[in-house]
Image: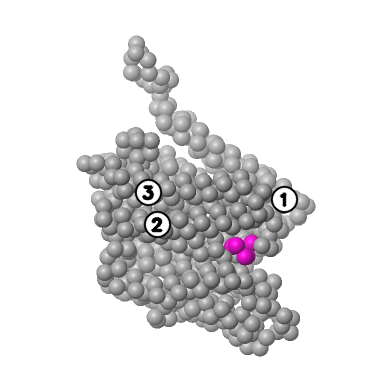
Amino acid sequence: MNPASNIIPLFVILSLGGAFLISLLGKKIKSAPDILGVSTTLILCVLSFVAVRLVNIHGALIYSVGAWKAPIGISMVLDGLSSFMLVTVNLVAFCISVYSVNYMEKYTSKWKFYTLFLLMLAGMNGVIITGDIFNLFVFLEIASVASYALVAFGTEKHELEAAFKYAVMSGVGSLFILLSIVFLYSFTSTLNMADMSAILIQKGPSNIVLMVSVLFLMGFGLKAALVPFHAWLPDAHPAAPAPISAMLSGVLIKALGVYALCRIFYNVIGVNSTISSILMFMGALSMVVGVFLAIGQWDLKRLLAYHSISQIGYVVLGLGLGTPLGILGGLFHLFNHSIFKSLLFLNSGAIEYSTGTRDLRQMGGLAKKMPITSATSLIASMSIAGIPPFSGFWSKLLIIVAAVAAGRFIYAFWAVLASILTLASFMKVTKYAFMGSLKEALSGIKEVPALMKLSMCFLALICVIAGILLIPSINFIFMQKASDVVLEGAKYGNLFLGK
Amino acid sequence: MNIYLLCLVLFCIGLYCVLRKRNIIKIIVGLIIAEYAVNLFFVLVGYRMEGRAPIFSPDATIANMVDELPQALVLTSIVIGLATTALLVAIAMRIYQKYGTFDITKIKELKG
């Protein structure tokens, strides 16, 4: 085993350890949750960049838990796709934990918040680095259970209702995932994903694989909120405290939904033309339905939640195309969306923090009173709407070009249409919230505290410069590795040969 | 074969309960039933007719042992189910305190 692979379990250990320490010390020492929470996420963020570097030097790394050899013991795998997702998740988590230091002052028991937050992070990191399919299910449930509790964190009427709906629907989704894992285990007699992939290729196509694909599509579709399964998202995401909305919309639906879908379909089961057309259709449907539902909303966070459905549609459409350009575009959009959508949710949290409302009709003229919030929100809005040179433009362009190149003109048309409608609905947000004259009731408001400003500015900076990730030499070390893993799907099965 | 079909029936009863019942507690019970059906199915996958426990000893013949891995995994899955159920019941209690009812047709303030 390569000594460098000792970094892999740290992603789970550190976040679990942080959660444990905070729950232990948080009640007694007032500042412990803040310091431990921020420092844990900072370390994880730095480690994830180290992981990218290590993947570039060594290629895919494998860690065997408890030194049991690969197909029998649990293994953890760090390859291009995992390191890409780790950077996305931990970068956003770091910004959000900095933001929460000030924002969560208005709630009691901050230590519970940070404990659950780090548990959720541990679950997501676990899903990303695991190489064992049952382990994936366990981590997925850790992240999900923590997120149910976080959605209900305010324990008011709406929070509880949303959390119940979310927990039941997501619980059913988990059952489908478990059921398909059972079928796959009984068919292949292994739980190691790489081993499973090799055996499935050997056995060739069969009806069980088809049925398992449908079950996985339902399960992960529910987790990713693709359109027929999206009903919980617009309730659950706005109900949570703003940093958690940012976390849920920004990374949770991607780590548990899109990443797992991508890993299972491209690397384990193997994608065929039927599955990829189903993925593309569901992507395009989510894209259009999400944006149409978003445009009529007056609740700012609910509007943003519907846009999450729409943007996830872009990611799945790009991945479903299956061409190198499409996959690169899909992954790039995944990264960009996690940055600008978490920024937008943090902005909505900042507005709620200062004005106490989420209704767009009660806002107005906030640009004068809250210059930083309004500037960062404008950057994020332009990014999500796809205005050059902001990050969202490049990834949408890649997806649309890939769709045209693959001859899918209808999907390209829908993607352009959804982009225009996104622009329209964010013009509405900017007009009602930040432009115009200041309302009488809002004359006493102040800009938010420093740490909230800092984290919003940092995310806005990434939005502006993310386009440089496409420069060939940078692209080669970061995103190219990730899209290669997806493209060379079946190669994943050879991972353990010669180790 | 029959036993697998019964398992499927149990799963469908659970799903029906989640989808059709109006009482929050009944929905939670439905989720538990569906979950147990999946767990049962998982154990059945590793079961063999007249199989014996997979305990290895020097004089034992390695023949006709049940597969022990699903049993270990089901244990994990039951624990996860316990966590989810405990959280759901806690949420249901808080919902009852706020709304004064368990009927989901009366708990629908979130729309649009």
Image x and y of residue A193, in percent: 34, 44
Q: Disc 3 designates what residue?
A: A7
Examine the residues drawn in magenta and state their main secondary structure: helix
Q: Are marks 2 and 1 in contact (CB under 8 Å)?
A: no
Q: Is residue A369 visible?
A: yes
Q: Amino acid at mark 3?
A: Ile
Observer-nearest of A67 and B25: A67
Q: CA distance from mark 2 to mark 3?
A: 9 Å
Read off the magenta span. A100-104
Q: Give the SS element for disc 2.
A: helix
Q: Give the SS element for disc 3.
A: helix
Q: Residue at x 54, y 36 (%)?
A: B78
Q: From what the image shows, is residue A50 above or below residue B14?
A: below
Q: From what the image shows, is residue A92 above or below residue A133?
A: below
Q: State left or right for residue A50 relative to residue B25.
A: left
Q: Amino acid at mark 2?
A: Ser
Image x and y of residue A244, in percent: 57, 60
Q: CA distance from mark 2 to mark 1?
A: 39 Å
Furthest residue in direction left, as rendered: A498
Q: State left or right for residue A300 relative to residue A5.
A: right
Labels 2 and 3: the sequence-earlier one: 3
Q: Disc 1 designates what residue?
A: B94
Q: Residue at x 43, y 46 (%)?
A: A136
Q: Disc 2 designates what residue?
A: A48
**Mark 1 crowd level (few <14, some 14–19, many ≥20, 10 Å Cα):** some
Q: Is residue A426 visible?
A: no
Observer-nearest of A131 and A221: A131
Q: Amino acid at mark 1?
A: Arg
Q: Residue at x 43, y 76 (%)?
A: A464
The chain identifier of the residue carrying mark 2 reads A
